[in-house]
Structures are given as structure tokens and as C-alpha cells.
């Protein structure tokens, strides 16, 4: 595989290499996750790695960080070949990783989190004092300000991420790998993160940024590698490329970034929430005074940074949790704290739900695909005659769903967990849409789904809208909300803080609302 | 660099791996037996002969296996629902109380064809009831079922001692036993020994459990809860009710041990008739991969060990009952706790040949 195409302008000679990967190869069983990958990461610059989910980015970085061992190939750090047997080796060579999901202990202070695993002796006091001094130096040098004595639980998500970066720097890392760092941030917080990365770069730190967002690649990197199906398909200087080219390289064909859809033909209101609120057992207010209307034939998108009540709102609307205040009307049935409903009854009313957490809620990983294809409908005809399940009917149903939604491989007997994210999502979506619901709730329709499948899923959702279904989409991907929705609601801290027509919305305005700054 | 390991084929996972585990256990047993001065080959020969060497031996092995099937199934059903039922011991004991009370109350009036089914249902109901209390505590009050089922074993034991010493004891007797059941309450004996018709009931239960778990919508919901409680909530399953259902079924299966022991062999209610079967059920289920067919195979092995071990301690003065328990313990250790020990080795071996 040719690594750097000849038209690339990444200078190969003048700059030191921080890391060089030579012909790295890794298989898991029959899955060839990384194929003969060679890559040159230059010292003191920001290198991006883009690719769809499952393209092998994370596997490659896990090999570099010592979490997996390559089947073949060489890793060179600062020009010398290294054996990475565990993250300990990687850390010893100055490589640090910031994971997508933070590895912080909520009930510890920033300082205590910082020294975790590097306590510096049996008595904590000495280590803490030294760490405090070092933290002061790092904060000044890189402009990473955090209160050392604050509890992690009290910090915002952006600040927690800063602690993660500090943790890595504290262990002496000069090469920083960030895995999808902006997934949990607002656009504004993401911009802050990129300013931090720029400062780090100015101080000679090497940064590797793994992402699937092209905007970030263009904004923050000097060079970019594109991965597809375990291979590097291109290496470019960021200044020599553009998002369209990168998208095409990622997918291997031209991608329609624009979704064609007619204006909505709105019908009657099928779901109405009034002053809906949810308080948990500890008295935490998760939802406050939610009011929304969903009409047949429209797609309403709910935007917001993850963790601002969208999950809870979906749970209440789907009947998984009962509201503690206010009322909800779904297809003529009124639901409130005294008259709760269960998800099974909601289904009978004509409400279908594609949950956010596909792996743990929408399917059962250990079940066969055919079993997953009747989850929630397992007591209905023709799958069950009240007592016995009709195995052949279930299998036939699953095969039909797989054909209609192009789920691959077409194997109803295969374990649900063996399908790729996109195919799992298509199966769940197929199951819910097959019921021709009046209301369709969709949480994170394309999380962990490859670009090809995203297009398909979006078009199916629009088709369903055009057939008169009321669709509610919750997504943390702003682009997705902007291209799918006819109307956009923004959630912040358990409230709906914005209600805008999609045609009039723009990313900046929504971003401000997502951050809690009132813009309407 | 490292060899690529493939997942094991099904036949290796279900047949070969358990056999290797058992073989490893026997090698360690052999070493221990040699240390205490007994010829391991001779001991193994006696063990096998004692378990399957004569029709009598086979009948005993099957009789023991019957108990293990009931308790193994009990643990499996709960396990598929994600519940760890450690209380098979107590549930079997209280099942015996139900069975005994039904017989003692009705054996003078009812004909055998009615009396025995009533006693079987009573055993199942009492076992289920004894499991229902911990289930209820977990479902509605969050007490952990492992803790409560263990405690309920002790409560059952104390209750049975009290009842047998003070209430159920036969008038004029010094031993804490009920009066003998009427002859009409005895289950037909097979092969002229302790083996009785309960084994047919046990096999019927295996089929019943298999149909229930994999071919009914309730079984589907139960397994969904076991694999992923959040998926079960999403599907609209009431987890509290499903917890009750799973534990009651589990307790009922454990309670049926009483049918084999009291209706088949002892013909009276007595102390500790269930001793050890409830706990061994955990190992049987583990080894049988929580599948009814696997449970039958594992139960046969445990039955053979129980019977062969008894013969062994009878024939060889160097080996006593405790030594037999050590043998069983090692089999449990290797096929349960250390089950995955030979797996990587076997994977490497098989993928190299493939």
C-alpha cells in the first residue's frame, strides 16, 4: 500500500518523526482490522486520523498505546524500534492517551485524580505536594487552568477533559493521542479544546487526533490520514485537501452530504407534553417544565450536549419512566404521575422507539438476530400464540426485515453482537418501522454507524415522515439534526431552551443555546 | 509474533473442554491419592466399577443423578434470568416439608393415583414459596438475592429441626422423624433398588425447562432480563414480576428433590435428606452450561462420583467419605472455577491444525 501519495506535500525530510508505524497488521479472528498500515507522525505537529466507525482507527491507536499487540509490523518512537506490551511501556516512551470516556473518579479532587497511579510513595502528602507544584507549572505553561482542589463531579465536561489532558502531561507525555475528544462537547467547548491543542503544539507536544468529524480535521490539524476498512487510503497535508475530498476518501465514493426532502405536510398532534417534569429518588431535577407538540408528518429534532435531559425525555416519552409532574398525551391516552404507562402499552398505542443505547436496550447482544428482531413484540401475533413462540415465523420475519433494510450479513441465526453498528441499527430501525407506528422516537439514529448507512437511515426516516408518521429525533450530532429535522428543539439542563424552524436555524445560534446562553 | 486464536468450535466447547477439565481434575486426584499411599489406578478402577460396574451400581448412580438434575435445573433457570439462586438447599428441604405434610394429611384417604400428584405439587409449591420470599425481597426492597437465599438455607434448616423434633415426630419415637408414609405414597421402584420413577419426572422437567426458556414468550422475556435488564425494561417486561416467576420456578424445581428422596426412598420426613444436593446443583448447572441437556450430562457425572465414591471408601480403607468430597471438590474446581484454564491452549492447538 502506497502510504503517502506522490501529490502529497507532507515534507518527509526536514521534520523529526515522533512516531513511525511500519506495516502494522492486526486481525481478530476472521476480521482483518488493520492491514499493512504505515504512518509517519511528525514531532510537534497535529496529525489527524479520520475514518468511518470500524475503519480501524481505534484499533491502530490501541496498538500504539500497548493495549493490543500487532500481528506484524514495527513501531518506531523517536527513530528507535519499540516493543509496546502494555500502556505502561507507552507511557514510559512519552505516549499518553485521552480516552473518549473519561477515566476519572468523580468523588476525588482534581489533584487526587492526577496522582492516581503515580502517587509517589506510601505517604500521600509528599506526592500531593509535588503534584500541586507540577500542576501549577503545567497550567501556566499550557494555559490549562483548573482548580486543583475541586471535586471532579463538580466540573463541567470540558473541564473534566482538561483534567484528562493534564493527567497525561503529568506523566511526562510528549505525544498525546486524543480519541474522539469532541464527542461530548458543545461546539464552543470544542473550539476551546482546539485552542488548547494549538498551545500544546506551540510547546512542542505532538498531537494525534482521532475523529470522524471533518470540520475538526480542517480546523485543528496539520496533516491528515484517511483510513478505510483497516487500510490507509490517503495521507495529505491539511492545507492541500478539503472536506469533500476527505469524505469521498473515507467512504470510497461520492457522498450526498445534503438530504433531499420536501417540506413537511403536518397533520394532527399525536403527542403532546405539558409541563412535564422528572425528579429522581435523590431529588435531582432531571426534566423541568417540558412542553412539546409532535404532529403527524413532521420530524422534530432535539439538539443538545449529551447529558442535558435528552435521555430522560426519551425514557418518559417511551413509557420507560413515569413523569413526576405534568402530563403527556400520546394518541389519545393521557399519562401523568398517577396514571403511568409501560412500554408495552405505548407500543399498542402506536408508539415505536429506537433507543439511544442500542447495545444494551434496543437489542440483546447474546441473542440471535431473529430473537432481537421481535424484542418488545414477542407476545404479539404471529410470533407468539400467547404461549409458544413460533420459531419459523420469527425467522421469516427477520429475513424480511433484513431484506427491506439491507442488513448484512443476511443471517438471522447470527448473534446480534456480531453485526456491525450500522447493521445493528438498521435491524432495530427495521423492527420498529415495520409496525407502521404513529409516533416514532429515535435516539441517536446514527451513533456508531458508518456514513453509507447514515444516508440510508436518514432517507428511511424521511420516508416514514412522508407516510404520515410523527418522528422525534434526539441526536448530539448537530449536523444530523440540521439536515433531518423540520423543527428543532434545544435542551439544556433538563429544559427546552429553544424552538426554531429548521430552515432558519444555524449552527452558531444552536450552539449558544446548547451551552445555556439564551439566544431566542 | 503471537498466533491468531480463533474461537472454539461448538463441539470443542461443549464436549472436549469439559472432558479435558475432568481429566485434569482426575490427574490431581490421582496425585493426592498416591500421596496418601493408595494406588491411583486401582482407585480409579474401583471408582468406575462402583459407579457403572453392575446394574445395581448404575441404578444408584441414576438415583443420585435425579437429585442433581432437579437442583441443576433450578440453578439454571434462575441463572438465565440473571439471578444466582444459592438457596436450592433450603428450597429442597422445605419442598420436603410440603411433600410430607401432603402425604401425612391425605395418605389415609386418597388413592395413590391422586395422592402422589398432590404430593408432587405440594413439594413444588413449598419450594417455590421458599424461593419467593428472597425474590420478593430483591424485587421490591433491593436485598441481594445471593445473601437472602443463603440465609434462607439456615432458616429452613432451623425450621425443619424444630418441626421434626416438636411437631411432626412420630408419637413415642426418640428419633426426629415423621411416621412412615402409607404404602400407597411410594413411587414405583425401578431396577429393584432406590432408583424410582422420579427420574422420569426429572427428565420431563428438563424438556419442560427447554421448551419454556427457548420456545415460549415468557421464557424469551426471562432470558432477555438475564442478558440485559435494560433491554427487558425497553421491551415492556415487568422485572419485578419476572424475578418472582424465575425464582418460583427455580424453587419449585429444587423442591422436587423431595419427590425422589421422600416418596421414592425414605417414605417419611426426616432431617437433612437433601444434604449437599442444593449446593452441588450450582456446580452441575455451571458444568452443564445452564442447558438442560448439559445439566443431565453433568448430573450423571456427579451421580457417578457420588456412587463410585461411596463404593471406593467402602473398598479401600485409605479412602474415607471426606476423600470422596475432596474428589468432588476438585471436579467442581476444574470444571467450574478453572473452566477456562485450558481454553487458550486448546484454541491455539485447534487453529494450528485448521
Image (cartoon, coloured by chain):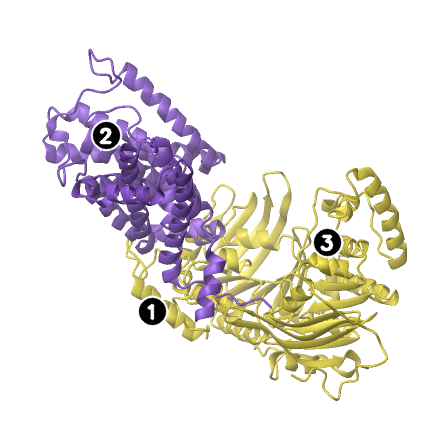
* Foreground of the two, A186 or B202: B202
Q: Secondary structure at mark 2?
A: helix
Q: Position of residue A392 (x, y in %)?
A: 30, 65
Q: Residue at x 39, y 60 (%)?
A: B12
Specify the label residue A396 is tagged with.
1
Between the residue at mark 2 and the residue at mark 3, the CA separation in whole angstroms equals: 61 Å
Q: Position of residue B250 (x, y in %)?
A: 34, 40
Q: Position of residue B186 (x, y in %)?
A: 14, 32
* Foreground of the two, A29 or A144: A29
* Left or right of B254 on screen, residue A337: right
* Label 1 vs 3, first from the N-terminus: 3
The colour chain A appears in is yellow
The residue pinned by badge 2 equals: B99
Q: Residue A175, located in which quarter of the rendered image?
A: bottom right
The residue pinned by badge 3 equals: A157
Identify the image quadrant of the C terminus of chain B. bottom left
Q: Is residue A445 at all visible to an observer of this figure?
A: yes
The colour chain B appears in is purple
Q: Secondary structure at mark 3?
A: helix
* Left or right of B293 on screen, residue A129: right
Residues marked 1 and 3 touching at CB (< 8 Å): no
Amino acid at each position: 500500500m502506497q502510504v503517502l501519495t506522490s501529490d502529497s506535500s507532507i515534507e518527509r525530510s526536514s521534520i523529526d518523526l515522533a512516531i513511525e508505524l511500519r506495516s502494522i497488521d492486526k486481525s481478530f479472528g476472521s476480521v482483518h482490522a488493520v492491514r499493512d498500515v504505515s504512518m509517519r507522525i511528525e514531532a510537534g505537529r497535529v496529525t489527524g486520523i479520520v475514518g468511518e466507525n470500524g475503519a480501524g482507527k481505534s484499533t491502530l491507536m490501541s496498538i500504539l498505546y500497548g493495549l493490543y499487540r500487532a500481528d506484524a509490523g514495527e513501531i518506531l518512537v523517536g527513530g528507535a524500534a519499540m516493543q509496546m506490551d502494555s500502556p505502561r511501556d507507552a507511557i514510559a516512551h512519552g505516549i499518553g492517551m485521552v480516552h473518549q470516556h473519561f477515566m476519572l473518579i468523580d468523588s476525588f479532587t482534581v489533584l487526587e485524580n492526577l496522582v492516581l497511579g503515580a502517587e509517589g510513595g506510601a505517604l500521600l502528602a509528599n506526592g500531593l505536594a509535588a503534584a500541586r507544584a507540577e500542576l501549577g507549572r503545567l497550567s501556566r505553561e499550557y494555559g490549562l487552568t483548573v482548580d486543583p482542589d475541586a471535586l471532579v463531579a463538580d466540573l463541567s465536561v470540558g473541564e473534566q477533559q482538561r483534567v484528562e489532558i493534564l493527567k497525561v502531561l503529568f506523566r511526562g507525555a510528549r505525544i498525546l493521542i486524543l480519541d474522539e475528544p469532541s464527542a461530548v462537547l458543545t461546539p464552543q467547548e470544542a473550539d476551546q479544546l482546539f485552542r488548547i491543542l494549538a498551545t500544546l503544539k506551540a510547546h512542542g507536544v505532538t498531537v494525534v487526533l482521532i475523529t470522524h468529524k471533518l470540520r475538526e480535521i480542517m480546523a485543528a490539524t496539520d496533516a491528515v490520514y484517511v483510513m478505510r476498512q483497516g487500510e490507509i487510503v490517503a495521507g495529505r497535508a491539511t492545507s492541500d485537501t478539503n472536506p469533500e475530498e476527505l469524505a469521498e476518501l473515507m467512504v470510497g465514493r461520492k457522498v450526498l452530504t445534503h438530504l433531499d426532502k420536501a417540506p413537511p405536510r403536518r397533520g394532527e398532534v399525536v403527542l403532546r407534553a405539558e409541563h412535564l417534569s422528572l425528579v429522581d429518588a435523590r431529588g435531582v431535577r432531571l426534566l423541568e417544565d417540558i412542553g412539546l407538540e409532535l404532529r403527524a408528518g413532521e420530524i422534530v429534532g432535539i439538539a443538545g450536549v449529551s447529558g442535558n435531559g435528552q435521555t430522560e425525555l426519551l425514557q418518559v416519552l417511551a413509557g420507560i419512566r413515569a413523569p413526576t409532574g405534568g402530563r403527556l398525551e400520546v394518541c389519545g391516552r393521557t399519562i401523568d404521575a398517577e396514571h403511568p404507562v409501560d412500554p408495552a402499552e405505548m407500543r399498542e398505542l402506536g408508539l415505536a422507539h429506537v433507543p439511544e443505547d442500542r447495545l444494551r436496550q434496543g437489542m440483546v447482544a447474546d441473542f440471535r438476530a431473529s430473537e432481537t428482531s421481535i424484542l418488545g413484540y414477542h407476545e404479539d401475533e404471529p410470533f407468539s400464540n400467547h404461549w409458544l413462540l413460533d420459531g419459523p415465523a420469527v425467522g421469516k420475519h427477520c429475513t424480511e426485515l433484513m431484506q427491506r433494510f439491507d442488513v448484512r450479513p443476511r443471517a438471522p441465526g447470527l448473534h446480534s453482537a456480531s453485526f456491525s453498528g450500522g447493521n445493528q441499527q438498521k435491524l432495530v430501525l427495521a423492527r420498529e418501522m415495520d409496525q407502521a407506528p404513529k409516533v416514532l422516537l429515535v435516539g441517536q439514529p446514527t451513533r456508531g454507524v458508518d456514513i453509507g448507512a447514515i444516508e440510508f437511515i436518514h432517507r428511511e426516516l424521511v420516508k416514514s415522515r412522508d407516510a404520515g408518521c410523527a418522528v422525534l429525533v434526539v441526536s448530539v450530532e448537530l449536523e444530523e439534526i440540521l439536515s433531518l429535522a423540520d423543527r428543532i428543539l434545544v435542551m439544556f439542563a433538563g429544559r427546552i431552551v429553544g424552538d426554531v424552524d429548521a430552515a432558519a436555524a444555524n449552527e452558531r445560534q444552536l450552539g449558544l443555546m446548547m451551552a445555556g446562553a439564551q439566544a431566542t | 509474533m503471537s498466533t491468531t486464536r480463533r474461537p472454539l468450535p461448538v463441539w470443542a466447547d461443549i464436549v472436549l473442554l469439559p472432558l479435558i477439565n475432568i481429566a485434569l481434575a482426575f490427574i490431581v486426584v490421582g496425585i493426592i491419592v498416591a500421596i496418601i499411599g493408595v494406588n491411583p489406578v486401582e482407585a480409579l478402577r474401583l471408582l468406575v466399577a462402583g459407579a457403572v460396574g453392575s446394574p445395581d451400581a448404575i441404578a444408584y448412580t441414576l438415583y443420585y443423578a435425579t437429585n442433581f438434575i432437579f437442583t441443576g435445573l433450578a440453578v439454571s433457570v434462575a441463572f438465565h434470568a440473571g439471578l444466582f439462586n444459592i438457596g436450592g438447599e433450603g428450597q429442597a428441604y422445605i419442598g420436603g416439608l410440603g411433600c410430607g405434610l401432603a402425604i401425612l394429611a391425605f395418605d389415609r384417604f386418597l388413592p395413590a393415583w391422586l395422592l402422589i400428584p398432590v404430593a408432587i405439587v405440594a413439594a413444588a409449591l413449598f419450594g417455590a414459596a421458599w424461593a419467593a420470599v428472597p425474590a420478593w425481597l430483591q424485587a421490591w426492597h433491593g436485598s441481594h438475592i445471593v445473601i437472602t437465599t443463603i440465609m434462607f438455607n439456615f432458616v429452613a434448616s432451623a425450621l425443619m429441626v424444630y418441626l421434626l423434633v416438636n411437631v411432626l415426630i412420630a408419637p413415642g419415637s426418640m428419633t426426629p422423624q415423621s411416621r412412615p408414609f402409607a404404602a400407597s405414597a411410594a413411587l414405583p421402584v425401578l431396577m429393584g433398588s432406590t432408583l424410582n420413577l422420579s427420574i422420569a419426572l426429572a427428565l420431563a422437567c428438563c424438556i419442560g425447562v427447554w421448551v419454556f426458556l427457548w420456545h415460549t414468550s415468557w421464557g424469551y422475556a426471562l432470558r432477555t432480563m438475564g442478558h440485559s435488564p435494560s433491554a427487558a425494561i425497553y421491551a415492556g417486561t415487568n422485572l419485578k414480576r419476572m424475578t418472582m416467576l424465575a425464582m418460583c420456578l427455580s424453587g419449585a424445581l429444587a423442591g422436587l428433590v423431595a419427590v425422589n428422596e421422600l416418596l421414592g426412598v425414605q417414605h417419611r420426613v426426616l432431617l437433612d435428606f437433601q444434604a449437599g444436593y442444593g449446593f452441588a446443583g450450582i456446580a452441575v448447572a455451571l458444568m452443564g452450561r445452564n442447558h438442560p441437556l448439559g445439566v443431565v450430562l453433568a448430573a450423571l457425572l456427579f451421580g457417578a462420583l457420588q456412587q463410585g465414591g461411596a463404593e471406593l471408601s467402602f473398598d479401600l480403607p485409605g479412602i474415607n467419605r471426606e476423600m470422596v468430597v475432596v474428589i468432588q471438590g476438585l471436579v467442581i474446581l476444574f470444571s467450574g472455577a478453572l473452566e477456562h484454564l485450558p481454553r487458550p491452549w486448546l484454541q491455539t492447538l485447534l487453529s494450528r491444525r485448521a
